[in-house]
Amino acid sequence: MADTKPEGDAPAAAAPGGAKGGLGAWLPLILTLVAMPALAYGMTTFVIVPQIQKAVAPLAGVEGGEGGAPARAGGVPARGGSGTKESVPLTKMVVNVAGTMGTRYLLSSMTLVGTTAGFKAKVEQNRDLLLDLASSALSNKTIADLERPGARNEIRMELLTVFNQALGADMVQELYITEFAIQ
């Protein structure tokens, strides 16, 4: 009976060969916990923030009156052109919504804004053309297109593109949709 070992001692005999666990097993975790915040700080400070600042820099002159852009009444500087913003409303456009067989319609009003010299006169001269272009663009939209999230922004960008193609390079700089109702 002296030859037999208790069962509790058997794992202890196997442990000396595998006692390497300790710090070596925890080293990858420790390095990860130290390196990840340092890497995140470095990327934010030296990559992401400078890119955001570079992208926002052209707009900084618009908000604060800096950057050489002339300011208009109210402290908001205008971009390009004569320096003063002129706006022209296009009101109460009613179009049939595509795919509804004439049972649904869209009522829309918008205001066009530009700073180039003679903007207001050019828009007034081409008012009928602009209304036709807007009606054509809006009447091609289905109910699903109009109710989709972000639809107003997509329509705004489409109309800006169409109007600027008709009037000339970047005449219309901003477009505000003042009414937008689907019936």
Image (cartoon, rainbow, N blue to C red):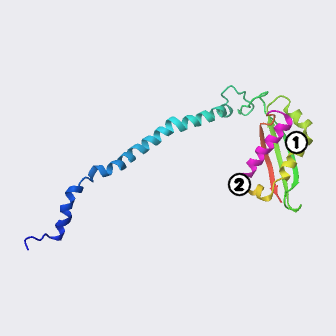
Task: Look at the image and say whether residue 68 sits in the magenta stretch.
Answer: no
For residue 68, which quarter of the picture?
top right
Amino acid type, mark 2: Pro
Q: Is residue 74 above or below residue 89?
A: above
> Which residue bears the numbered disc 2?
149
**Is disc 1 surrounded by few (<14), some (14 to 19) or many (20+) residues within 10 Å?**
many
Label 1 SS: helix
Q: Position of residue 166 (x, y in %)?
A: 86, 37
Q: Classify the position of the N terminus by image quarter.
A: bottom left
For residue 56, which quarter of the picture?
top right
For residue 10, which quarter of the picture?
bottom left
User: Residue 130, which numbered label?
Assistant: 1
Question: In the image, what residue occupies the spot 18% across and 62% down?
Answer: 12
Q: Position of residue 150 (x, y in %)?
A: 71, 51
Q: Position of residue 82 (x, y in %)?
A: 79, 27
Q: Is residue 121 left or right of residue 18?
A: right
- Read off the magenta span: 150-169
